[in-house]
Amino acid sequence: MKRFSLINVLLLLSIFLTAEEMNEDHIDHSPLNSKCFNCHANSTYTFFNEFQERTVTKRMNPYFLIDSVIFYDQNHKSFECVDCHSYDYRSFPHDNELSLDLMPTCLDCHEGDDATADYHFEEIDKEFLESVHSTKHSDDFTCWMCHNPHTYKINARNNQNIKETIVYDNNICLSCHADINKYQLITNKQNPNVIEKHDWLPNQIAHFAHVRCIECHTLATNDILVAHQIQTKDKAVKKCVECHSKNSILMASLYKFRAVESRNKFGFFNSVILSDTYIIGANRNYYLNIMSGLVFGIVLLIIIIHAILRILIK
């Protein structure tokens, strides 16, 4: 009985602590959002058809489905739907003309905002306007082509797992470049095969799993954590030494945020690479190189002295 009671106490304590944690992260769900999710979070929706004079059930367009759990776990979780969408969406059925309204861009909210100044949205927009996405497709290509406002979550700054960041960021690129349906929203060209286009790359699987697309296809800068100036394919990085060297470009892009945090802790430039993975040619330290050279020299000197002594004694 005592053992059973103890287990019950521990179980109740666990439930209590979990509830407390949930309360700390609690987000006040907007009643208006809940009304939207009644339809947009389900595969079907029901309404009264005045022409047929009966209640009917229809299938929701899969492109308009929104996972409410994911929505309340992403960066814009505190927003109401009508903060971005027209207030006229509050009535149902929706007016078809509402779909022609322009969606706000990142700068519509974040430009000149002191609360998000550290993210340098103005610089990001400047880079984006100089990217191949913008110069080739102009107004047809917006922030939302890559960053879904219902699911977007900052990853590089908040995730300690570099590999998860790589998968998350690469999936953003592949959401177009591996999906013909989305790719042809802005072009009538055939979506190129990503594998075939990178057939020059040795050990493709390892590179795709450990490097983001933007490492080779963007121009890295100092102020922005994630570069947005996508280059044309002829300017893509193809030289191995760009990554596999002491001054690896990965330190200026993929490992930038972690490097700033870890440099003081480990005491040398490529410390974060050493703690996360091994990159041939990049995992170097000046002082370790000198120490290795000294050790090698001493061992070689001992061998030479030993050989000379054996010859003299003989």
Image: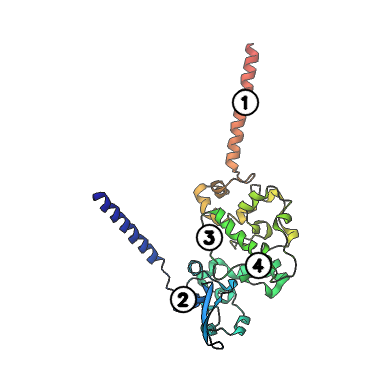
Q: Which mark is residue 301?
A: 1
Residue that mark 4 sits on = 127
Residue 99, quarter of picture: bottom right
Q: Secondary structure at mark 1?
A: helix
Image: 197 above or below 80: above
Determine the CA span between mark 1 and mark 2.
78 Å
The numbered mark, 2 or 3, whose residue comes first in the sequence reads 2
Image coordinates of residue 56 in percent, x first then y, are 53, 81
The numbered mark, 3 or 4, whose residue comes first in the sequence reads 4
Q: Amino acid at mark 4?
A: Glu
Residue that mark 3 sits on = 157
Q: Residues within 10 Å of mark 4 (few under 14, many from 20)?
A: some
Q: Secondary structure at mark 2?
A: helix
Badge nearest the viewer, 1 or 2: 2
The numbered mark, 3 or 1, whose residue comes first in the sequence reads 3
Image coordinates of residue 32 in percent, x first then y, are 47, 79
Residue 20, quarter of picture: bottom left
Q: Amino acid at mark 2?
A: Ser
Q: How is the image coloured?
A: rainbow
Determine the CA span between mark 3 and mark 1.
49 Å
Determine the CA span between mark 2 and mark 3.
30 Å
Image: 284 above or below 87: above
